[in-house]
Amino acid sequence: MSKQISPIERSQFLNLFRAVAPYIYQHKGKTFVICLGSDIFSTKYFDNLVYDLNLLNSLGIKLVLVYGVSLPLTPSERVHKNPSNDPRVIDLECLQVAKVAAGNIYYQIQAAFSQGLPNTPMSGAEFKLISGNYITASPKGTINGIDYQYAGKVRKIDTKSLIQALSDHMVVVVPPFGYSPTGEMFVLSEEILSSEIAVQLQAEKLIYFVPLNQLPRGGSEKSAFSPCQIPKLLESMATDIPNQQIIQDYLLVSAEACRNGVSRCHLLPHSEDGSLLLEIYTHFGIGLMIVDDTISYIREATIEDIGSILKLLQPFEEEGILVKRDRRDIEQSIHQFSVLDYDGMLLATVMLDLYPQERTAEMACFSVAKQIQGLGEGKKMLQHIEKRALELGLTSLFVLTTQTTHWFLKNGFHFVNTDWLPLDRQKKYNPLRASKIMVKSLVEMA
Ligand SMILES: CC(C)(COP(=O)(O)OP(=O)(O)OC[C@H]1O[C@@H](n2cnc3c(N)ncnc32)[C@H](O)[C@@H]1OP(=O)(O)O)[C@@H](O)C(=O)NCCC(=O)NCCS
């Protein structure tokens, strides 16, 4: 029995696969450190998460999984009813419970990764896990008169062995323990441990799962924040959200990791099926991302950008908003293009066609990818071009537009007749298209 793929399914599949392809390429060979808090092992979608981790591994991503265990309260914490007191005192009883819990979780992870995954596209795939004494720790010691006993802090990470295991295509599993050169064992906080490993490995991503369905964004629509925006985000967050302390800790640790060279940190809702894939392989993701400010910037185009510029312009040309240009046109004028580079993806462009004698230039091919329109990027591109025009000594900018007059009016352009255009441009004006000509004076800005 054979069933043909319908045209809609075919186009949906092709669009989806093509949209994901750049991310697959971008992440291949990169290291992701993933912190698995103790709550995640009992969530409904844990098996799906393991499946997704397998998938990432098969797509060439190097994975370090750092896990945590839930600890019993010490007698003093029971008396003071202060379970969220951090750092925790780890007494001997607590250490024993942590060891048993960590062993159980390790076997649970091994079992989950060893599933045959029948009837799934990962069927037959085999992944090897590895663990070891990668972490040297020392006791946290006595702080303000409190002896933290078996609570430890990271002293050294055996980065060489971790890198070796990752190059051998192993998934590295790190329990929340460190060992002292005298043979003692200390319990470590998994969020700090994962962040320190990510920093040492200069990982591409550090990922935390937060025990929430949806992440608070402090009233902002944004999902990406720079480390310096985190204090403000924390201030603006509602104070009554569940697990607020955990979110706050993760955000602060992430901001620190980012400052120390981890490219991106992500907080994902742990009970959302597929949150890992949605975050990594879609543009806007599903969680909160903490990233260095330099993720999005406007730069001059190079010949490597030609394919992406063509792709960006195509939908607007098909809608008749922009005049069609072929590869050759763009190749010849590539040095007149500016582009918005967002995390390696090209999401907006504009070309400056100079008329030096008239001290003006045409803004052509001005376009912002549909998925980010309305977020102010068009305005930023215009400001960039204005600055560039001023540096070139120009006194005005003009555009020819059929459908976007209101945007330009709002941004300081006014209508003029064809006579206004430089003579060379007048000759190329297509009356059939009947574009409106709009000009912005730069004189007041100079
Ligand atoms: C025009 C364009 C470049 C603006 O980029 P953008 O990033 O969406 O713009 P911004 O976010 O800076 O500005 C958004 C504002 O412009 C408005 N806007 C967007 N497109 C508009 C249009 N075609 N006409 C009128 N207003 C428009 C939005 O409603 C929004 O208004 P608000 O601030 O009141 O909410 C983008 O919409 C685009 O690429 N359009 C298709 C190509 C095009 O028309 N190019 C110009 C041809 S010369």
Image (tube, rainbow, N blue to C red):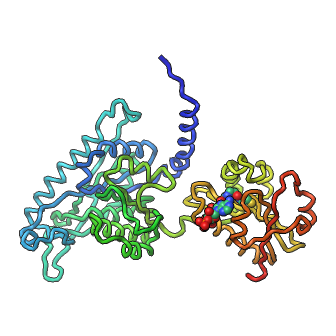
The residue positioned 42% from the left and 68% from the top of the image is 219
Q: Quadrant of residue 196?
A: bottom left
Give the image quadrant in which the ligand numbered 1 is located.
Answer: bottom right
Front residue of this view, candidates 321 and 307: 321
Tell me if residue 20 can be seen. Answer: yes
Q: In the rendered image, which quarter is residue 88 located in?
A: bottom left
- Residue 255 at x, y = what percent? 40, 70
The furthest residue to the top:
1
> In the rendered view, does 152 fall on the left or right side of 3?
left
Q: Nearer the viewer, residue 151 or 240?
A: 240
Nearer the observer, 163 or 107? 107
The residue at 27%/45% (across/down) is 44
Q: Position of residue 249 (x, y in %)?
A: 31, 69
Q: Is residue 339 visible?
A: no
Left or right relative to 394: residue 114: left
Compared across the picture, whether 151 is left or right of 126 comes to: left
Reply above or below: 436 against 235: above
Give the mark count: 0
Residue drawn at x 16%, y 68% as measured from the top left: 83
The image shows residue 293 at horizontal and vertical percentages of 51, 70
User: 147 or 247, which lies in front?
Assistant: 247
Looking at the rendered image, the quarter that the C terminus falls into is bottom right
Rendering coords of residue 313 (x, y %): 70, 52
